[in-house]
Each structure stands twice: as C-alpha cells, then as structure tokens.
Image (tube, grey):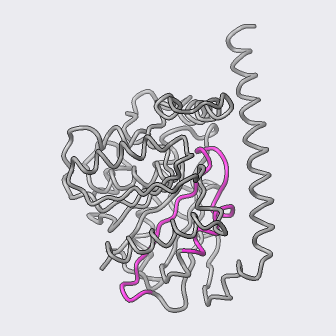
Amino acid sequence: MSSPSWQRLEQARIKAGSVGIQLTLEGMSRLFRLAPQARPERYGIRVVRDQRYGPATPGNLYDVWVPATPRADRAVVLHIHGGGFRVLSKDTHWLMALLFARQGYLVFNVNYRLAPAHPFPAAVEDCAAAYREVVARAAAYGGDPDSIVVAGESAGGNLTASVVIMACFAREEPFARRVFDLGVVPRAAVPFCALLEASNPDSACAAVRSNFIRDRIRSVSSTYLTGRPAHVALDLADPLVWLEGSAEPERPLPPFFAPCGTADPLLQQHRRLQQALDRRGVRAASPEYAGGIHAFQAFFWQPRARQAWEDTFAFLDDALA
C-alpha cells in the first residue's frame, strides 16, 4: 500500500474513532443534564450561552455561568475543555462550569477550533483570544479581571499551561504577544490530568502496557500537530518542556494545582511538572489520587473525584486570599 493511501486510511480510522467518542460523550452529557441536580437555576446560577469571541469562526463561542452570590473577591474561571484537541466542547463539559459556579466563581466556559481541520496552533491561538475576552468582559458580569483562574483537563490542561506561559513570558508569536501585552497574569492555574508534551507521545507511553491506549495517545499527537505551519515553534504544544527549560519569565508564574490519578498514563508528566515548578520556586501541588483513571474528576459521584474537587477549591481559596 502506498504511503498516501495508508495516510488516508489512518486519517479515516482516527476520524471514525473521534466521532464515536464525541457521540458517546455528548449522549452522556445530555443524559446527565436531565438530573435535577444539574440544573443551574437550582443554585441561582444564570447561564449566558453562545457568546462569540476572537476570530469569526463557528467554533469561537463561550458560555458565561454567573452565580447569584459571587465570591467576595469575584474570582473568574476560564475553563478550557479536554478531548485530545479534536473532539468535545463546552457543551460536553458543562459539569465543570457548574461545579466552579456553585463555588461562587464567575465561569467562562469556552470552545476552540479542533484538529485535524484546525491543527496546532489554532487551539492555542483561540485560547489566547478567549483569555483576552475574559479580561475585557469579566467586569460586565461582576467578575474581577485581575483575579482569573485558568483551568482545564487533558488537552485543556495543556492549553491552560500555555495560556499561563503566554501571560508570563514575552514570546514572539503575535497571538502570544497580545496576551502578554495585557499585563494580566492568572492568579492560579489548574491543569487536571494534562497532556503536557503533545509532540512526544512516547513520554506518556513509556509506562503504558495497553497497546490501545498507546495508540490513542500517539494519534492525539499526530492529529493535533500534522499540518501545522512549519515556522511555528512547538513550545506552546509542549508547555512542560518549556517550563523545564532555562528561560526566565518576565512576570512571576502563578500557583499551579495539577491533580492526577495514579492510573492515568499522564501521571509521569505531572510529576515532571511538579519538579519543574519546584526548581523555579513556584508554588505548586500535584496530588495523586489512588486508582484514578484519566479525567477521573468528571465522575463526580466517586469519592476520589469529590476529594479532588474539594482539594482544588481549598487550594484556590488559599491562592486567591
């Protein structure tokens, strides 16, 4: 079989798998929404849906979750969904927005363009624009633009770390420079179970025994990075490597809270993140939850997930005090 034919077959296989995951999780999301506990109005939360930000593309939408009684500091959360950079949306990740909003946070729950139609750095560029939108619009919803938490899981955790880097390091990419020029550094970063080195899937696969999981991790990397512009550096696809490097930030990095399950193939990357932040003197915690699989915090009915959320909110209360 010729190389182009093999590539087309592989792309079709990846697309079919992604569609299957998308449909399954969208169905679960719709089912969970039927529960009385899932209704935001039950908690006095108002949701302003499908607001547009940044470039005029169909994917650049966000919802604002406005609590009835904001926190005293009116802290704001920019939440970035996961999905391997290629599936899912703010609508599949409404639960995370609800959990933050129930704690009194003003939440901007965002979409971004997805691979393979929009490879790296499209997602990073969109999240840069979303961060600028939060800074510009937070006050209109009663939030403090100087008290922003950036949070996300898996691919969203990667993008969370990249937003922090753009806010703290003076980089050359125009979209990164626009974030830096805001002069607003997040007060905290919460990358849940983050894929922090997208260009090197083998760094996450070393401890993985399952061929299926190794294949999934490698396909995420390939889908996200294939077709990227040759002139764009991979630093913001690999925020872990950047933070492990020697470049000094122009502005201090914020505290990081990076929870991960012990059964997550990305656990070693989280341990490296803790070591990198420790070397930089950054306040950081990366608690490990026994038996937790990838994105275990989404299974909110499990004790370990509830504990992870309690620990997250406790860390943020202290970081924002």
Residue 192 vertical position relative to residue 40 in the rendered view, above or below: above
Q: Residue at x 65, y 31 (%)?
A: 210
Q: Is residue 144 left or right of residue 154?
A: left
Height in image: 298 above or below 240?
below
Q: Relative to the observer, which residue lies in front, 178 or 244?
A: 244
Judge left or right: residue 17 versus residue 106: right
Query: Residue 212 vs residue 315: left or right?
Result: right
Figure check: 104 above or below 183:
below
Residue drawn 74% across the image and 15% down it: 5
Give whichever of 22, 256 is nearer the camera.
256
Quadrant where the C terminus sits is bottom left
- Quick check: is 85 in the magenta stretch? yes
Residue 189 is inside the magenta segment = no
Q: Main secondary structure of the magenta part?
A: loop
Residue 133 picture quarter = bottom left
In the rendered image, which quarter contains the N terminus?
A: top right
Residue under the point 34% across and 74% down? 147
Q: Residue 303's x, y, as percent?
A: 60, 67
Give residue 272's position: percent from left, percent from top: 36, 42
Quadrant housing residue 9: top right
Q: What stretch is highlighted in magenta?
A: 71-99
Please tell me which residue is depicted at 67% across the width and 53% down the height of the picture: 88
Measuring from the top left, give residue 214's x and y in whole percent.
Answer: 61, 31
Residue 170 horizontal side relative to residue 225, left or right: left
Give whichever of 199, 283 is nearer the camera: 283
Q: Nearer the viewer, residue 308 or 1?
A: 308
Residue extending farthest top: 1
